[in-house]
Image: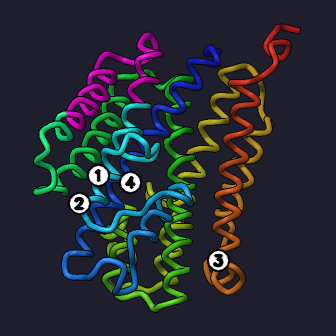
Amino acid sequence: MLLSRVADSLYWISRYLERAEHAARVLDVRLDLGLDRRPNHDGWDFRRLYAGLRAPANAQVPETPAELVQALVFAQDNPGSVLSCVTAARENARQVREEITSDMWEQVNALFLRLRQARSEGTWAARPHYLSRLAIDGVHLFTGTTSATMGHGEGWQYLQVGRYLERASAIAVLIDLHFQSASELPASHVEWAGLLRSCSALEGYCRCYTADLRANRIAEFLLLNPEFPHSVRFAAARVESSLRTIAQLAGRGAGGRAERLAGRLHASLDYGQVDEILSEDLHGYLESISRHAAQIHSAIYQTYVMYPIESALPA
């Protein structure tokens, strides 16, 4: 069984990197969609973008694309900025150097240094998409390096739990925001495509449904598709599977609270029907996913990180 501090650091490495990639991708898509549109008009504004990234309610919302990039990529006072997340992931990786491979450390450290260099050079304003791709590609390289060089044991499973729990929650918030906006002002074809692109899902959706973008199909694909890596159902399945494996490797047996909560979330998505979800209360359904993710996080901490010492002693 891993030390609790090691489990905690591994879990947060992947959560922070997943958060950084998500922020970079959403920013990249929004800058693309805003090329021929006015800020705070045309059915979308930076405030909604901030809400999609779960920024603090009192955060000062930028007024220009350059300020937006500065706030979401480099701002040190924004814990959700790309650089803040990568810095936190790097610090967690530094604390568990003995558990990760040298290749993993080199990759997360290189991403951190590249972002700091881009900030210090000050030339990013002319190529903001370069920054987004830098972050996205860097996280993908770390993920691939991890799968290829780290043993797929208990530590690897904590990385999986962190990544997919963060992903499930982030995708649910993004879907909720977009469908609420569409109920207020019908979304255009471009906006629906933007939602799919923000989830790396446009090509996958088109292969499944063709290029006919319909709200019910988009909701079904992003929520209930069992094979697409950025669907909530896929993420929930990976969280449940990894938590079950962790329980077995840690000798805690099956049926722990974290595993039960993950299984309940996965089952609700396995048996969900998009027509019923949309006709009843999509907002409530998506909020319940976020609540489930928060409960799973708390259960993981209670079971594997902040547990009383007596529970770890042999009977």
Q: Residue at x 25, y 52 (%)?
A: 132
Q: Residue furthest right?
A: 315
Q: Along the polypeptide, which appears first: circle 2 or circle 4?
A: 4
Frontmost of labels 1 and 4 is: 1
Q: Along the polypeptide, which appears first: circle 4 or circle 3?
A: 4
Q: What's under tag 4, amino acid-wise?
A: Ala
Q: What's under tag 3, amino acid-wise?
A: Leu
Q: Nearer the viewer, residue 179 or 61?
A: 61
State the extent of the magenta-drawn residues as a range: 89-116
In the rendered image, which residue does mark 3 sit on?
A: 282
Q: Residue furthest bottom?
A: 186
Circle 1 packing at 10 Å, graded few (<14), some (14-19), many (20+), is: some
Frontmost of labels 3 and 1 is: 1
Q: CA distance from mark 3 to mark 1?
A: 33 Å
Q: Note whether 290 is above or below 95 in the view shown.
A: below
Q: What's under tag 2, amino acid-wise?
A: Ala
